[in-house]
Structures are given as structure tokens and as C-alpha cells.
Amino acid sequence: MENGNTAEGKPANHWGSEEYLSREAKDNTVDNLLQGEEGGPAGQKSYVGLQRKLGLTSGISLIVGTMIGSGIFASPRYVMENSGSVGLTLIVWSLCGVLAMFGALCYSELGTMIPLSGAEYVYLLEGFGPLAAFLYSWTSVIVLKPSQVAIICLAFGAYVIEPIFPGCGDREDLQPVVKLLAALAIGEW
């Protein structure tokens, strides 16, 4: 091993290489840890685990749900008000689409370089160590994900009330109704 590379010229610290994973890490995979108690036929081990399969339909659903989300429904009004013209609004949305594409390309590169489950946690663990990965995970669980769900539910509540009470977003007396619908949406989730 010279200059951090193996004899084959592969990086020694590459997640996909067999050399990187120690024997203990190979034995402590999720499939091995969730091993069935009775074993399979003819002495084979039976494992409990998720299939690593992402088809076209589930891939499209994942991208639409995470990339498009509810922002397209909640923010066009404010973009239009602040830009002042339809042309500038379309330019802003196009630039934001290009930025989102760059982010998606970064994630696809990370996903092929580090083929382990865990998304941002694993990427931060490899790049910055366990402290950064741990802090991001806790921040995500305590702050980021709940606030994302709250924003989505508030947008849902506002759009459900809008046909019944036009202009309810600007009325202070109808804000409790919007918040109640948002709370019901969170409870149903």
C-alpha cells in the first residue's frame, strides 16, 4: 500500500472496497444482526432485511416527494410579489432549478462513491468524522424534519381553507382553523 492506494491502484479508504471493511464490520451488517433464530433449509442461515431495490416508479416518487415537495405550492406568490414581473419570476425559478439539479448531482455522486445506507449521516461520517455526523443527525431529528413537516402541513391547511374562505391567509381570525387543519394533517401522517 503506497500513497494511500492498494496494489491494484484503488484508494485504500474507499467504502466500496473489500479491503476497507474489517472482518468485524462485515460480521456486523444489518442482515447478520437481524439473523433469524431458526435458520433456513439445509443449514443455511435465514436473514431478515430490506431488499436493496429502487425501481423507476419508486425512484420518480422519491425525487418528486423530496425535490419538488410543497415549496412549489407555497412560494410562487412571494416570488412574484418580490420580483415584480413574470419574466424575472421565471428566471428565478429556472436558476433555482439549476441549483437543485447541482444538489441532486452531488447526491448521486455521493451515493455511488459511498454505497451504504444512512444518507447524510454516512457522508458526514466519512468526510468529517463521527462528531459532525452525530450532531447533524440529532439536529435533523429534533429541528429540521419536524419543521419541514410543520411547513408542509401549514401549506396544506391554507390550501384546504382557501376555496372555502378566500383570502384566509391574510385574516387573523381564520389562522386557528389553518393551524387546526395542519395539526390534523400531522396526526394523520
Image (cartoon, grey):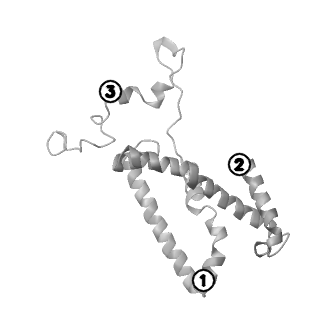
> Residue 126's x, y, as percent?
35, 46
Element class at badge 3? helix
Q: Quadrant of the N terminus?
A: top left
Q: Amino acid at mark 2?
A: Trp
Mark 1, residue position:
82
Mark 2, residue position:
189
Residue occupying image coordinates x 60% and y 56%: 65
**C-alpha separation, residue under disc 1 versus residue under disc 3:** 58 Å
Residue occupying image coordinates x 64% and y 55%: 149
Q: Amino acid at mark 1?
A: Asn
The residue sitting at the bottom extreme is: 85
**C-alpha separation, residue under disc 3 versus residue under disc 2:** 41 Å
- Say if mark 3 contacts mark 2, CB within 8 Å: no
Q: Is residue 162 above or below residue 63?
A: below
**C-alpha separation, residue under disc 1 versus residue under disc 2:** 33 Å
> Residue 178's x, y, as percent?
78, 63
Quadrant of res 90: bottom right
- Label 2: few (<14), some or many (≥20) within 10 Å? few
- Label 3: few (<14), some or many (≥20) within 10 Å? few
Task: Say whether residue 94 is left or right of residue 185.
Answer: left
The residue sitting at the right extreme is: 164
Element class at badge 2? loop
Mark 3, residue position:
23
- Label 1: few (<14), some or many (≥20) within 10 Å? few
